[in-house]
Amino acid sequence: METWLLSLIAFGAMAVMLSLGVPIAFALAGVAIAGTLLTWGPNGLYMIPKTAYAEVTNYLIIAVPLFVLMSNLLQHSGLAEQLYEAVYRWMGRLRGGLAVGTVIICAVFAAMAGISSVATVSMGLIALPSMLQRGYDKKIAVGTISAGGALGILIPPSVIMIIYGAMAEVSIGQLFMGGIVPGVLLAALFCVYIAVRCWLDPGLGPPVQERYSLLQKLVVLKGILLPFLLILSVLGVIYTGVATPTEASGIGAFGALVCALVHRRLTWKGLRQALASTTSLTAMVLWIMIGAVCFTHLLAYMGFSDLIKEAIAALPVSKWVVLLGMQLTFFILGMFLDPAGIIMLTTPIFVPIVGALGFDPVWFGVLFTVNMEMAYLTPPFGFNLFIMKGVVPRNITMEDIYRSIWPFVCLQALGLILCMLIPELVLWVPQSMRKG
Amino acid sequence: MALSLIDKSLKRISWLNTQVGQWVSYLNLLIMGIVVWEVFCRYLLRSPTSWAMEINQYLLAALALLAGGYTLLEERHVRVDMLHRRLPPKARAAVEVFSGLLILLLCAVLLWHGSEFAWDALRKGKRSMSLLEFPLFPSMALVPLGAFLLGLQAAVKSCQGILVILGRGLDPMDTQSAH
């Protein structure tokens, strides 16, 4: 059969299964097995267990459970409360100060955690009630936390970047470093937006009345020491090239465990929950990888990548239009799927195209991650929306949450466009690392 | 009578996968400990171990493969549930049956070829191509073992779906919250 027809059938079957709600891992594997039987015959199935074995013993992926564990343990460390107390004492008296401070805490958490849910849940439980109680506008409060929490996957460490790096065979250390400037840029855009809105209309984020002496302000800073040591030890060793991301993830998880024990916040039940949730997330990621790699083998066998290359070469548009098209695809998929799933579905197709067009794969990986910031917020399936729904008081509806995020999604889109127009924003740090 | 027997076996399988999931989750701590030990040896003692990272690769395989069934039980395999949530219970059950059968297909392939693959490693005494020369059979046997656990749970999923379609069971989405 013709390659294009086969590909069409494969993608069509996949689309139907995914929209019906078949788990991504098994939709990929199912299409791969059926396709292999159809084109190659039963002998082709030999590949599948070998592929599965190669994926689950991938050295790079060891960092996934460890960074997730680090994040889950940080949730039990009491660091979030301490950071928020510092923000409250130092910035509470400014208009919108608590919301700006919340974005900063989210960025700090993002530099310790590899996933977005830690900051979103912690700030949803700590900062949200505090802001609402002090008369902050609910849309500013909810939007700030949803958008700030999403920074978790952009500011390194990042589980999404590890998965992308492993699938696209790009250096994970370089991706991490590439995420720093865009992450800080997005955080800065959020802060400026909140500060300007609250400056123009103090009713959105009224100043806190309490006053603190300098001593009271200084005392609270001791809570900041541990997080900064943790960030320094994880990111510092990766930047200087002393340790690999996998080694850094082990140090980070261990550091988070120590933090949680030092603050005496970790119960046996909390530890077991953190471990169980790390386990199911890791298994989820690896089973999707097994499905995705089986699917990639099928595409390769069908000659799909040659088809794509021919199609791209014959395409009457510039490579920038193709890039824009890919970003648009990511954005649309992001409304329905979670980022790990999007990587698995698109890397087999997009990565060869990106290579053929001559774009920097590190840059593309970071652009993907910036794009996924929006995926965490866009309905109907925005992960942070559901987290927020779980923590907001009853008088805030799903509608309120949907409405709160749009300004932030626009700022994220602006950040993405800036990173596309000025690749140096992404590539400056990784390049300085390459030279160093 | 037959129904209660089915019900009992479904519960046993779910119990088994819960136990497996909870036990393998301690591997996370072991993997962390090994990385920390390796970092300690490499950077402070200046004598890296030859085994740490390779053993961790096998532990990762155990973690991911054995917890596949547990993850299915906990409904943590990512899916697009926008349409799924809105389907009438029987249509939703039909999707669950179909998903279960797809998983069984994958598990059958992994179990069948994976066992051959592991048996071959055992028979020939295959070892890893590293300094450690660790036997490959135990980690390779995890592929069919993990597929077996996942397949059992997928069979539970399909059976529950069929019971719903026959009008004899609870919606699997509802029983989920009972765990």
Image (cartoon, rainbow, N blue to C red):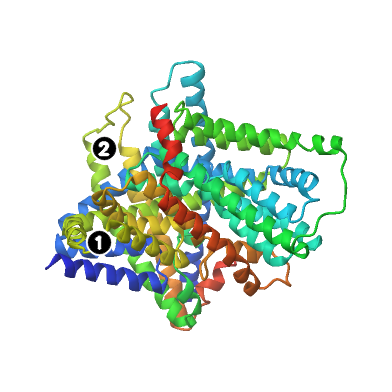
Q: Give me the residue at 45% from left, 49% from top.
A: A160
Q: Secondary structure at mark 1?
A: helix
Q: Chain of mark 2?
A: B
Which quadrant holds the C terminus of chain B? bottom right
Q: Give me the residue at 15% from left, 65% from top.
A: A3
- What type is the residue that disc 2 sits on? Leu
Do the residues indicated by labels 2 and 1 lie within the same chain of the protein? no
Picture quarter containing residue A31?
Answer: bottom left
Instruction: Specify whether residue A285 is in view.
Output: no
Residue that badge 2 annotates: B122
Picture quarter containing residue A44?
Answer: bottom left
Residue that badge 1 annotates: A33
As rendered, which of A398 and A93 lies closer to the eye? Answer: A93
**From what the image shows, is residue A304 above or below residue A272?**
below
- Residue found farthest to the front: A200
- What type is the residue that disc 1 sits on? Ile
Q: Secondary structure at mark 2?
A: helix
Q: Is residue B5 left or right of residue A169?
A: right
Instruction: Specify whether residue A130 is in view.
Output: yes
As rendered, which of B94 and B16 lies closer to the eye? Answer: B94
Mark 2 or mark 1, which is nearer to you? 1
**Disc 2 residue crowd, few under 14, some 14–19, many 20+, Cα 10 Å:** some
- The picture places residue B114, in percent across and down from the top left corner, at 27, 49
